Image (cartoon, rainbow, N blue to C red):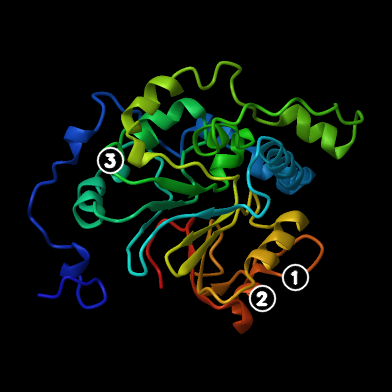
Amino acid sequence: MSNSSRDSAEGAGWGSAEPGAYRALMPQRTEKLSWLDPRTLWAARNGVLASLFGDPTGRTRGRWVAQRAAAGAPADKVVRRDDPDRFSFLVIGDTGEGDDPQYAVVPGLLKEGGDTRFAVLASDVIYPVGSADDYGTKFFRPYRDYPAPIYAIPGNHDWYEDLGGFMRVFCDDAPPLPPEPAPRPLTRAWLRSRLWHRARPDDGRQLDEARKLRSAPGQQAVQPGPYWAIDAGPVRIVGIDTGLLGTLDAEQGAWLREVSRGPRPKILVTGSPLYVDGEHHPCAIEGGGTVDAIVRDPAHRYVAAIGGDIHNYQR
């Protein structure tokens, strides 16, 4: 029997009668995530508000990027690793539910990918709203035995609390952004601000304890911001942040064009797939152009584009 999902359902893991052992990895009590729960839907309302009253993601992202630059992050946002010419890395998508669906795949991930050089989480690291205190159960605990660094790009769910938890975990414990000036009353921005979901003031109090689960030196990774490039061996991996509504701000678009230059073969990792469910989603860039056009340009030498968000495997 082939062990490839390209050849058979059995190769994809279907049909096995072997009982799973993943429950031993889980905490004794877990809270099942339900999208039928009105409380969950209300907490995750910021995407709808951004659609109705204007999307503030680009401005907030720019403030995060400026903060990281002031703290010493490299201007080109490139992580330069020391990897051999031939190596493997993992890409995992939409992981952060913290219950059976997440933990069930961890034993297989460790068995097949335990010797990889690093991993990339392709969006939606934490459901439902990216809270910092959810990282213990939904990130540090499930991947505590993965021995290598983990990088990540945010998905829309990570943005539902303005990316604060994500930045603390992946970007050198970035401190919260200072409050912005209040918008003018009775404007669309004012209405959005009045209804906007925000993190609890005490969110993150459990992070220091959670970090101990992945505290080995070889597990540590610091990335320059919510979007980045990684030079690993002969390849450049480009991770973009498509925010709440699946678009790029002008600053990130200019960076993407610049980082896509050069002879290295490249792999795009995005939270908004360019092709999914038989449809084309080119991913607009503020001010003009699309991510798809950049990736399709032969001069940029992209060999693959990997997207999260859709919660199933398509190719």
Q: Which mark is residue 260?
A: none
Q: Is residue 108 left or right of residue 180?
A: left
| Secondary-structure class at tag 1 | loop
**Label 1 crowd (10 A; few <14 / some 14-19 / many >=20):** some
> In the image, what residue type sits under mark 2?
Ala
**Label 2 crowd (10 A; few <14 / some 14-19 / many >=20):** few
Q: Position of residue 222 (x, y in %)?
A: 50, 41
- Mark 2, residue position: 293
Between 114 and 310, the one lying in front of the other is 114
Please report contact status of discs 3 and 2: CB closer than 8 Å, yes or no. no
> In the image, what residue type sits under mark 3?
Asp
Q: Is residue 220 above or below residue 264?
A: above
Q: CA distance from mark 3 to mark 2?
A: 38 Å
Which of disc 3 and disc 1 is earlier in sequence?
A: 3
Q: Is residue 24 left or right of residue 103?
A: left
Q: Is residue 46 left or right of residue 84?
A: right
Between 106 and 146, the one lying in front of the other is 146
| Secondary-structure class at tag 3 | helix
Residue at point 19%, 36% (across, down): 23
- Mark 1, residue position: 289
